[in-house]
Amino acid sequence: MRTNVVTDDDLMESALRASGTKTKKAAIEQGLKLLAKLKGQERIKGFRGKLRWPGNLYEMHFAGPNREPLRRSGTEHSPKFQISLVRLL
């Protein structure tokens, strides 16, 4: 879609430097894509605490097929520690 845009010169230069794009068109397109993505994420955040999930996080993370318990630096963690990690996720 062809559109004429009047922008602040300093803002455009800052956007060009920050985005690494070479053209004003590319900077504007990248900015619009980012705006659309962020607004979509805001809408998704609105569902926080409103959706029910019947699954089991422990089974999903640790007891599923071909899955091994979480390990860090070659040491195994106790089941109590693993469950507390699941609660954080």
Image (cartoon, rainbow, N blue to C red):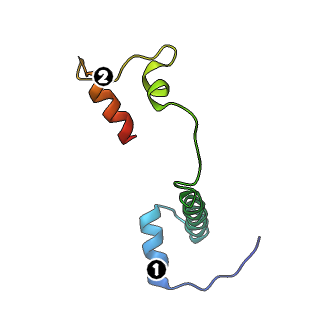
Q: Residues within 10 Å of mark 2 (few under 14, many from 20)?
A: few
Q: Position of residue 6 (x, y in %)?
A: 60, 86
What amino acid type is highlighted by mark number 2? Pro
Residue at position x 60%, y 67% in the image: 32
Residue at position x 37%, y 38% in the image: 87
Q: Which is more toward the observer, 69 or 16?
A: 69
Up the image or down, 31 lies above or below 56; here it is below
What amino acid type is highlighted by mark number 1? Leu
Residue 37 is tagged as none
Please tell me in which quadrant of the rendered image residue 38 appears: bottom right
Q: Position of residue 7 (x, y in %)?
A: 56, 84
Q: CA distance from mark 2 to mark 1?
A: 53 Å
What residue does disc 2 label? 79
Up the image or down, 72 lies above or below 29; here it is above
Residue at position x 49%, y 27% in the image: 60
Q: Position of residue 24 (x, y in %)?
A: 57, 71
Quadrant of the frame with the C terminus:
top left
In the displayed orientation, state which residue is furthest to the right.
Answer: 1
What residue does disc 1 label? 11
Secondary structure category for the residue under label 1: helix
Q: How many marks?
A: 2
